[in-house]
Image (spheres, rainbow, N blue to C red):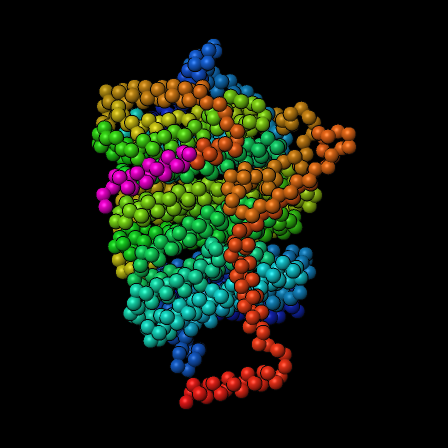
Amino acid sequence: MSPLSLAYLALACALASGVLSLGADRYASLLRYGSTILLGAAGLAAVGAGGWSLLHESRHADQLLLGLPWLKWHVRLDPLSGFFFVVVGLLVAAVSLYAPGYLREFAHRQNIHSRAALGVATALFVLGMLLVLLADDAFVFMIAWELMSVSSYFLVAYQHQHAPNRRAAFLYLLMAHVGGLAILLGFGVLAAFGGGFTFEAMRAANLSAAWASIAFALVFFGFGMKAGMVPLHAWLPEAHPAAPSHISALMSGVMLKVAIYGLVRLTYDLIGDIQWQWGVAVLVLGTASTLLGVLYALMQHDLKRLLAYHSVENIGIILMGLGLSMIFISNGKPVLGVLGLVAALYHTLNHALFKGLLFLGAGAVAHACGENDLNNMGGLIRRMPQTAVFFLVGCLAISGLPPLNGFVSEWLTFQTALQAPALASGVLRALIPIAAAVLALSAALAAACFVKVYGVAFLGQPRGRRVGHAHEVDIGMRAAMGLLALLCLVFGVLPTFFIDAIDGIPRMLLGITPPSATAGGWLWLTPVSPRVASYSAPLVFAGVVLIGGLVFLLLRVRRKNIRRGYPWDCGFGALNARMQYTATSFSMPIRRVFAPVWDIEEEIEETKHANQPFRPAAIRHQLHVQDKSWPRLYEPIGRLVLAAARRIGLIQTGSIHTYLAYSFFTLLLLLWVVT
Amino acid sequence: MTAWLLGVLQTLLFVVSAPLLAGWIKRVKCHMQNRAAPALWQPYRDLAKLLRKRVVLAEHASWVFRATPFIVFGATILAAAVVPLVLAQHPAAAVADVIVLVGFLALARFFTALAGMDIGTAFGGMGSSREMMIGALAEPVMLMAVFTLSMTASTTNLSEAVGYTLNGGLVLRPSFVFALLGLMMVAVAETGRIPVDNPATHLELTMVHEAMILEYSGRHLALIEWAAQIKLMVYMVLIANIFLPWGIATELTAQAAALGVTAIGAKLALLGVLLILWETVMAKMRLFRVPQFLGFAFLLSLLGMLTHVVLETGG
């Protein structure tokens, strides 16, 4: 028994889940129980395999009896893939706990066409992701990558009766393939120099600096597109909300992370010699993604779209960590580079947990009240008390507040950025703190955004009748959310254990043993040295519990000491739910402050009473806020493609004679070339 | 162990003396504006009165609303617990550095804003929305100012930073001057003082912080008010002890501690007078002038950072 055989077990379970789902159209419960249980088993096996490999820092390589005659499939499980196995496995396990309850209602409400299609695509999607992580040659990698992309295309297009979903799915497929093409070309460069498709050969390849930069630019473009980096993020807020919620959780929580895996694998492991310009590019684009992601998210009032934009933000934070790490490594400070890498990887794990939790929560809300629009929600904390607690944990974690997990990884990223004085270049020393300030701004804006989400959806009064009659979701769904919420707390309070385990990855990639960030014992997280910075999450948590509990016990308000009364209404009479702040009005001050970031169309029409010029009879207000990347980047490219197609179309006359002539002349030309 | 015990004592001193500072500020303000001043310990009387009173709770209030005062109070005490007040070597400073301190204050703000949204009145939502906007703009300025300092001292540990400034002697660092100005402006914005917000107003449309806590009463209100006083003191002690740490006790003798208490008392009294001077000559701004105010503060902190990078590090 080795980690690799456990990993095979995970793959086999995923595959079996897909096969079993084939019968789901006839036997409905097959999907809900059979295939989700197998999927859960796959998730657990993946966590086991990954954790084992990570803790023992073992590397297991193998060849499968599949593939081309001269190129067997190479697979390998090392600490880096092991880490991502854990990330994928944890979320897949939670999702499979959640899926039965969700699917029952979903099938009931959406009148779905084919359960089999859903089950098979989900299983293949998980299989594809796991196989990408295992791949040890470019051939398997690309096949698995495409399997992941295409199966998730079917999941996005699953509710294809709605036109926007079809459009989102097409856009996703298109961009996934443009990105895939770039990755393929990047592998091409590496394979040409290395003389083979295996990662072993690519590692040994001796690239000139220019070719290495070209390869890096290609893979950064390709993986950046899949990860949803600004400005290549356009597909993400369209595609993620279109899929069923548990699939959105998988896509946002782990599929983006698989792209991060690809970037780390190719840059650190296969290409090797990192140049500082790459680090600057990653840092700048990461910073831009962080800020723009959160600003776009703030303007959304569709819960799932908002969460999807937050994925752009968090991918930005991960990229900032990677960029810093690459800058430090290329400047001969590998120890600090390790710190950045660890920060990025820890945020990868944390983001998977809290974003999975939030998407599952959004699914629960949609499930309970049939709404995705925040402006119709309200007061859910009374209808769904447990979901409300779990969702609050997710909101605190994503806003980067202590003592939860999001804070730890953001803190590590800040600490990495603060080591900028170690660099020789003055430009970099000035650039990095500015990036850190942008990260601070984004974290604060994310907090504002989640006050909005939680305040509008869960607090206050219900804004619609269906929301007022919402009900708590079933035990499986609550258990899945509870599990993720608990993990968010555990990873926030006991970070030292997990960071210790991650340390094996830089040891493998960079061949250096970093001074452990946990040298001071499990209580203390000291990334550089205890003098420079320390954070003791367990003590902070103990302090929170102790002080909060003590004050609560001393000053608890007993029931008899409370009088319930009406809230203050300025003496004008009954307040109603329409008077509350909505998501749109909540974000209005920020919309005004950062106005140049969006394309805002606002229209106010006032109809006045005939004889009372100062008293409006009715006011119509229309607001449309759009992502600027569409008019600035995508539409021009689209127009360019159309124009080019029209030019090329000129040679298509529609007459068979002309086409025969084309074939004839092409043949002649080729014959001439050959001879 | 003694060090930890002293740390706890210092935190207690911090928490207990925060209302005194608030009383002092109120008194100076009244004198400055030719009004009859309340007694110095009026804030204690107010807190005692509120703690005794019965709580009136809005009918729709959920547990978030009832838990918020405790969370806010707890988070603010934790923030106070990591700031060196009298003793420079403070063991709790290693538990949470200055970034965590900002995190504690952000946690308190997050819950206050949620409580504002909980009742479902327009005021609460308005206050929360404005507070989060101001907070989002103020937090990067605060961190930028602090980063200037921690890059100079190459530490984010507050005790170490104080020690660095003490050992450095009286050197005029241009970067510190900029960072100090930026931090002072943030402190004004974050603690809801004029010109950003007015703690004394109950004029409905200009409230920010007061609008969020409008529905609180009794003990809940007492905790929130006390937390606000502690928060003001945290900012003032930060400014006093990081930039001008002289007088702080570096050794554990009664004499040094007495000197430390006197020194921080004098510094805070002086800063209070400065704050009131500023509040008296300024008028409250319109809400949408606040981003310009904070933008200017950001510019100052950025200048501080750049001065540090360009002038003060070789290479």
The foreground one among A587 and A638 is A638
Residue at 31% in and 59% down: A275
| Rendered-image quadrant of the C terminus of chain A | bottom left
Report the side of A455 relative to B260 (left or right): right
Asked whether the viewer can see residue B174, the reply is: yes
Residue at 29% in and 21% down: B263
Q: Is residue B302 magenta?
A: yes
Return the x and y of residue A459 as percentages of the image width and height: 59, 38
The foreground one among A58 and A310 is A310
Return the x and y of residue A662 as percentages of the image width and height: 55, 83
Return the x and y of residue A244 as percentages of the image width and height: 59, 58
Quarter of the image holding residue A54? bottom left
The foreground one among A633 and A73 is A633
Quarter of the image holding residue B259? top left
Q: Is residue B48 above or below residue A277?
A: above
Q: Is residue B22 above or below residue B187?
A: above
Quarter of the image holding residue A547? top left
First to last magenta residue range: B296-315
Magenta-colored segment: predominant secondary structure? helix
